[in-house]
Amino acid sequence: MSAVISAENLEKTFHVGGRTVHAVRGVSLAVSAGEALGIVGESGCGKTTTARMLLRLEDPTAGRITFEGTDITATRGAALLAFRAKAQLVFQNPFDALNPRFTIGRSLAEPLRNFGVAKSEHEARIAAAMARVRLTPAADWLDRHPHELSGGQLQRVVLARSLLPGPKLIVADEPVSMLDVSVRAGILNLLRAARDELGLAAIYISHDLALIRYVCERTLVMYLGRVVEEGPTPALIERPRHPYTKALVAAVPVPHVMQDRAPLPIKGALSDAPLSGPGCAFRDRCPLAFDRCAAEAPPLRNIGEGRKLACHLGDEA
Amino acid sequence: MRSLLRFLRSEPFAVAGAAIYAVIIAAALLAERIAPHSPTEILRANRRIARYMPASADFWLGTTSSGYDIASQLIHGARTALQVGLTAAVAVVAIGTLLGLLAGYLGGWVDKAVTRLADIVLGLPFLPSMLVLAALTRPGTLTVVCTVAALLWPNTARVIRSQVLSLRERAWVEAARVTGCSNARIMFVHILPQVLPLAALYGSVAIGWAILAEAAASFLGFGDPATISWGVMLQDAYANQALSRGAWNWFVPPGAAILAMALAGFMISRGSEKLLFPKLGGS
Amino acid sequence: MTLLQLRDFQVHYASRAGIVRAVDGVDLDVPAGSITGLVGESGCGKSTLGRGLMGVLPDAARIAGGSAVFEGRDLLGLSARARRDVRWRRMSFIPQTAMNALDPVLRLRAQMLEVLIERGGLGRAAASARAEELFRMVGLDPARLADYPHQFSGGMRQRASIALALALDPALVIADEPVTALDVIVQRQVLDVMRDLQARLGLAMILVTHDMAVVAYACDRVAVMYAGRIVESGLAADVLERPRHPYTMGLTHAFPDVHGGTGELVPIDGAPPVLINPKPGCRFAPRCPFAQPRCHTETPVLEAGVACFRAAEAPALRAAAALPATWGAG
């Protein structure tokens, strides 16, 4: 088992005002050290809920999460604290991710204090983390409050905080979507460098396939709580197999004037009454759906080259 | 500093309230120096007990039926008023904030229990409940403070709870969890400082209520007759039929003082409400 | 034909620290029947420019100078009433969050009718027919006119706010980050609706966005804004494929490309200047890897679509800008 974190058949059901919402239905994944996995999908597809379950911020309704060989699905107390030190999160909104009343230095000392790092080591470890995110000298930043920093600087501090406990896994939920375009590349490069140099397992949650292409070797496409396709990112983007992935890739604009502007191979919109019962959840939007798609749900299965697909059309291909 | 000044200028109510407090605090601190007489000394004039003296240079507001100096009693009464008001406020803030924080952050059965209890207490009529409590325990300012705290915490707890409910969704609270903070640490180190200003606002309202409660309790005879307070003064005046004797100088000043201090608390809270929730007001 | 011509257009904000020159002397030509992308990072003044044109600025902001000639008349010279009339009938605005354009307590039919009857002077029956036509135009089922905005998804709301913006047949539509809050598939669908309507109705559109790829997908022309000024403008094909301003060059390397064509991404170090009493000189000079002494003292003007002293060396600068080391990234 080389996977840092793995999940089997994760399920999450919410009860909202008498209605039951299946946010995540049977998601399995594994990420090994030094590897970056992307989870893409539209809002409401369950990607963020999946990430929150992996970090034990949300309890799964069913399924199993294994971290470094130990089942952590229901762990509590000291064991949960030990897991927290090794599994960190980079937030989407850097303007909200730091306590507004704490100085940067105090925010950075929080994980060290909570995870029992000796006080004498704090200064050196904070300086090292700040150097890693290129906020140097650290002394210039530690006494400031979050409102004095720009979005890019804040996200660097958030990244430094997540690296301080010495994690084995970093989850980044839309890490640059709130940032200015000119600083996004800087944050992505820092995340990539941290993963490479520290040998971290990384999971990126995003709706942006271009970002995922830049940082993840492997990608998992989610639709309405299910994984519909999985595989090495370049292959998945250049030769998508699932009709949903095809639409998702086709929808991403590219920064060149010459580009494909053909109508998207997809019907309707996400909120048009998600289908329940047997059958493929995508069948009402799928331009290629046929009888079998309504009768039975396609299972996620291996199709070679390290790829997986949940579509009946894969049979013929 | 400049923004404080601008705020004061835009909030005449808050300024008036603060001015009243300043006068009362000064009176309480400097009572011995300001008051012309001891409030408990039976004064004499022309070798006789100085009963019902009118206002004069010696007795600024005249004297009572027992020969006490009304002005001196009024000045010393500020101490009791402040004591009662501030301790009640602190107690209300402490209980309300603690319960609101626990209910809002922990949710579940804690939330249900606190909310239910608050609903029950809010349903109790203030004055009768206080009198029952005062009658059951021993009279005195401590009883008054305890009753005010016991009856007024739900308002604070409710607003703190809803504030905490929204803060709990903030990313930095989640960040605190991810970085290993215990629930207690998240509540008391991360969230508490954010809600304290709001709690203080409700505390200033409690000051006004506490003063009124103390006066009412004393007036109805549930107070501590040995203390010098505005309520006891009113009760004394009433018992000696000051009204029918036309001794305005006896019962108007303590009544006005009670009203002024209670009002000041409400005025300050009104003003600071705009400071804390600028979106509510027009400014 | 030039539909809108801005010359030295200025919008100032009053702040405690002083006057912020959010839009500081913008020259821009918007031809009829085109989509112009107005692109730049947050705080560059692109939204303020759009809002200033529409007269929907916040209280602290005001148009401080210049001219805005629209259909042959200078908007700034008109009476407040005449200006409002032009803005209601000939121009319209699509905000980033559709909920800002839609009234949450009114059914969409009522909102459409209000605009068509009150402002457009249509009769009730004609207005009703027009409302249904507009919904069909943006790809919504006319039956959904009976719904409230909260019954719509984000993409449908944005379509509804486009329908509302097109109600009175405007000549110019200003859209402020209309697809930023949307998922990628919905974003593409909304962009397609906008492109399609623009072509069919022959409108001119100003699309305010931070996303170069959205500009590349949807716009014929582009104006790149930095620190309150236009630094480069022209045909999208020219500006995106052969940028001549270093800032535009930087932006083209700051974005990932889904097909992996961008290579190593390069951030532009530093931050835009504060626009209170800005220093003379090119405003991008402090972040520009190609700045010369002159750039810090003299202000380059927008000439032939670019405001840079080294525009003539553009091909060489482009080659250098493609290297991460140029931008100080190690």
Image (tube, helix red, strand yellow):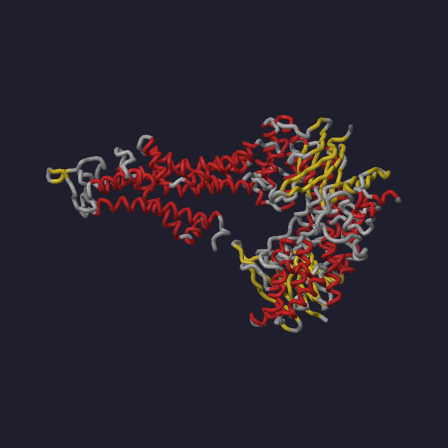
Determine whether, in the image, residue A51 is placed left or right of residue B33: right
Q: Looking at the image, is B228 positioned above or below residue C175?
A: above
Point out the residue furthest to the right here: A316
Residue closer to the observer: A211 or B67: B67
x and y percent of residue B61 in the render? 21, 45
Residue C227 visible in image: no
Where does residue B164 sit, x and y in percent of width and height? 53, 40
Residue A300's image quarter? top right
Query: Which image quadrant is residue C200 in?
Result: bottom right
Residue closest to the eye, A183 or C209? C209
| Quarter assignment of residue C8 | bottom right
Kindly tell me whether residue A4 is visible in this rendering.
yes
Give A98 or A272, whichever is nearer the viewer. A272
- Name the one closer to the observer, B179 or C108: C108
Considering only vertical position in the picture, is C249 above or below A305? below
**Farthest residue, direction bottom:** C72
In the displayed structure, A119 sits above or below B55; it is: above
Which quadrant would the C terminus of chain A be assigned to in this image?
Answer: top right
Q: Residue at x 45, y 48 (%)?
A: B273
Image quarter (top left, top right, bottom left or bottom right) of the N terminus of chain A: top right
As drawn, is B15 to the left or to the right of C160? left
Q: Is residue A303 left or right of residue B127?
A: right
- Residue C295 lies, in percent from the top left, at 68, 56
**How many numbered marks appear?**
0
In the image, residue B184 lies at what x, y percent? 54, 32
